[in-house]
Image (spheres, grey):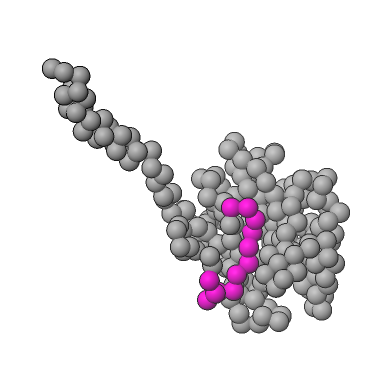
Amino acid sequence: MSFRKLHLLLLPVLAALVLAASAQTKKQPPPPPAHAKAPSPPVTDELIHQQFGDNCSLLAGPPQFVADMDGDGIDDLVVAAKCKNPMADKDEYSFVVGDPYDSFLGYSDVKVTSTFASDEPDRRGVSLLIIHGAEKDAWQAEKPKAKFLLINLPFKTLVVKKLAMKKRTILGIYMEEKGEGENNSSVVFWDGKKYRYQMLGSTLE
């Protein structure tokens, strides 16, 4: 058999192998995230002080959540807290101060928005603390993957549940708002780089 005939015979076989290989390596969409659950036992101020400093303490009332917020398959922690001076401890305790709410409104400099004071005394310093878990020990790791302190979120109630995006399903932190946004609903979610705020009913992507 000539080399040319052999080449022609092998072409379909090679094409089939290439197609099979590409089908196997094609990125499959990740499975939907598991439902959020409560940490057991509940988180105490000891962990909050260890990870965010003594300026932060747990806020009584809102539930605590364990859920995979960043889609890496490892449990993260979401808790509400009061933090007196978020910017003062961010370098010492290696956390990111974010302000998804004011960024949504067009104020992107967290150094400025961290000085905003609520007209309501009980709202001052109210924050969301999020710990992205590391592979070992998840959110309870001594050195987590990342930590975030989100300020100026006008939440009255909190719940972590699924959020359908255009290409995938993730978890979002749903809020019923108080203050200026009284009776409004919104959601905060991880976009792959940072936490974003979105009023419900608006376009998410």
Q: Is residue 104 magenta?
A: no
Please give the name of the residue rendered at 63% of the width and 67% of the height, measured from the top-left corner: 197
- The image quadrant that residue 176 belongs to is bottom right
Please give the name of the residue rendered at 83% of the width and 61% of the height, measured from the top-left corner: 111
Please give the name of the residue rendered at 70% of the width and 39% of the height, measured from the top-left corner: 143
Q: Position of residue 88 (x, y in %)?
A: 86, 54
Q: Position of residue 87 (x, y in %)?
A: 83, 56
Give the number of marks. 0
Q: Is residue 197 magenta?
A: yes
Left or right placement of residue 143 versus residue 136 in this view: right
Q: Is residue 153 visible?
A: no
Segment tinted magenta in the rendering: 192-203
Please identify the quadrant where the N terminus is shown: top left
Please give the name of the residue rendered at 83% of the width and 45% of the height, measured from the top-left corner: 92
Q: Is residue 5 visible?
A: yes
In the rendered view, would you say 28 is above or below 24? below
Q: Position of residue 177 (x, y in %)?
A: 64, 76
User: Farthest residue toward the left?
Assistant: 1
Q: Position of residue 62 (x, y in %)?
A: 65, 66
In the rendered view, would you say 5 is above or below 33? above
Asked whether 173 or 14 is in front, the reply is 14
Asked whether 29 or 135 is in front, the reply is 29
Left or right placement of residue 23 versus residue 56 in this view: left
